[in-house]
Structures are given as structure tokens and as C-alpha cells.
Amino acid sequence: MGKQLSFRKDGSFTIVQFTDVHWKNGDEKDARTKALMTRVIADEKPDLIVFTGDVVESLHCSDPYRSFKDAVDVAERSGIPWAAVFGNHDSEGATSREELMKVQTGLAGSIAEAGPPDIGGVGNFARTVAGRDGFPAAALYFIDSGAYSELPNVPGYGWFRRGQSDWLLKEARALQAGHGGRPIPSLAFFHIPLPEYREAWDEQICRGRRYEKVQSPRLNTGMFTALAQAGGVMGTFCGHDHINDYEGTLHGIRLCYGRATGYNTYGRWRFRRGARVIRMREGEESFETWLRLDNGAKVEKPRKHSPNRFSKA
């Protein structure tokens, strides 16, 4: 289960989110990705590192399991707790999520778990962050958003299963029971954006860039509803769409993209690779977030987007 996560003495807890690393075989582009991650970790000194999927591009790896180890090596060597959820490219072909999870849980610093075997996906687990009194003061949910549709009449990407939503609500109720009956401030991490990310862009003021359409699944299976019903969920963090990095609030939950990290995949000219940084503070039902780019720049005030209700994405 790894090291107990705890707020610092100053009441802060900082997370660095890397997403879409797309590690292949350790070529020059992978080396650039590793240098970026090394720099971000040195600059931000986080308490937790989270990879939100597509850690490797398994179809292009000579040994996907070796490549996964190489991709997360920076986190493992840092001595900082870390975890990864899987994306659609991690387990293509003969590569399996189950075997990737065995690799992940065997590495130093990993706080990941395979999770319940019968709810859908691999790597559904929750972790608490202890307050200064030693009791849980915040929670983090890690959820497998799937890969590709398994229904021939539904094209596109996979979706959350009902068992995952039920699991999330069960976890939230248990945490609430141990928190004086009050919802515990929480964050959720997964790879593929929820359909509600599109709704947030269309209907709400957002901050950041959207250079491609939201590539969410064609079916909406209600995970956002579960997150809202769970209570205490302040924000969600995904990847998948490499040239989107916006965040917007919908029904009290901040829906955030990470910043694509890996050079061994598509991007956009002048849209620099980087990472998202999240900072919680003990006792506060909110969080700060910013981007840290590959040139060291810190983006705290991204561009404002006002919705155009006559031009839907």
C-alpha cells in the first residue's frame, strides 16, 4: 500500500500530475520527457506524483513492461509516493493491465492497488491524506476509465462501468462515516475525460486552452453523477486530449485537464509540454492549481474562455 500520505506541517499537500507520457523505447524524445519530469519534480517538490494514463504506448514498445518501468523511473527514484492510472494506449495488443499493475505495485514508492476484481477496470483504489492529528483530512480516488468500446455498434473509447460508480459511492460513504458524518474533501484522477468536460466548455467560464474536441466516450454511464453524489469531490483530473489543458466548474466540481507531458506523441506548435500542479490545504474545501511547462515557466493565470452557446463542440 505504500507510504501514508500526510499534509505537511504548514497544512499543504502538493500533487504533480504527469499525463500522456507515451514512453516507447528510450529514444531521444523519451529522454526529453524524462528531463521535463525531472525538472518539474525539482521545481515543485511535490508530496505525490500521479500519472493519468498512456504512460506507455504499448504497441510501439519492444517490451511494454520494461518501458513502463523506464517511464516512471523518475518518480521511483525521487523517493516521493506516486501512482498511475491506465489509459487506452497502455494495454493494447498483448499487453495487459493486470500485468502492468503487477509491475507498478512492485516498484518503490508506488501507492497503487489493483482494486476490486469485479467492478470493471484495473487500478480502482482510494487513498487518504492524514491531517496533523493523524486522521484522514482528504481523499484521493484513482479510477480506470477504460480503453476502447467493446460494443460493435458504439464506436470510440471505453467508459466507466456501473460497478465503479457503486464502488466510489461506497468508498465515499465509508470515509464520511469516519469523518464525523461530513463529506471529506476529495480529488479524482482518471485518463479519458467525462462527457461533462464538453458541457463545462460549452456552458461555463473555463480557464485554459481547448485545441481539440473533447474525446470522451459516446456513452455517458453516470460517473459524474456518482462524483457529485459522493459529496466532497472538489475536482477531477484527466489527460487523453493532448492539446487541451483547460479547467471549468460544473455543479460545484472543477473538471481539469492535465498538461500533456510526453514528446513521443502528437502535440501542437508552441503548445509546450508540461505538467499540472495541484495544492490542497488541510481544512479547506478548495485547491489551487497551475501549470509548470518544460521551459520552467509557471502558468497561474491561463486564458479565460467564455461560452458560446450558439457554437457547440
Image (cartoon, rainbow, N blue to C red):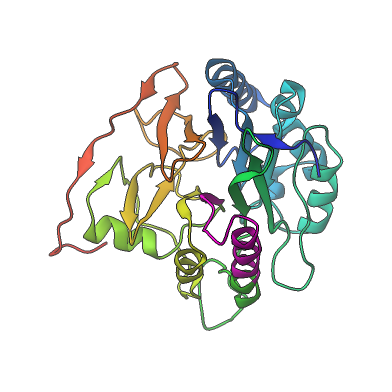
Q: Position of residue 167 (x, y in %)?
A: 65, 69
Quarter occupied by residue 84: top right
**Which of 88/144 is in front?**
144
Q: Is 255 within the magenta?
A: no
Q: Check the image and name the residue furthest to the bottom.
A: 153
Q: Position of residue 49 (x, y in %)?
A: 63, 34
Q: Position of residue 270 (x, y in %)?
A: 34, 27
Q: Residue at x 38, y 36 (%)?
A: 268
* Quadrant of the drawing holding the N terminus: top right
Disc tally is 0
Q: Residue at x 51, y 69 (%)?
A: 226
From the viewer's perspective, is 307 left or right of 161? left
On screen, residue 162 above or below 18: below
On screen, residue 19 above or below 251: above
Q: Residue at x 30, y 40 (%)?
A: 208
On screen, residue 256 above or below 48: below
**Which of 298/262 is in front?**
298
Q: Which residues are magenta?
A: 167-188
From the viewer's perspective, is 130 left or right of 304? right
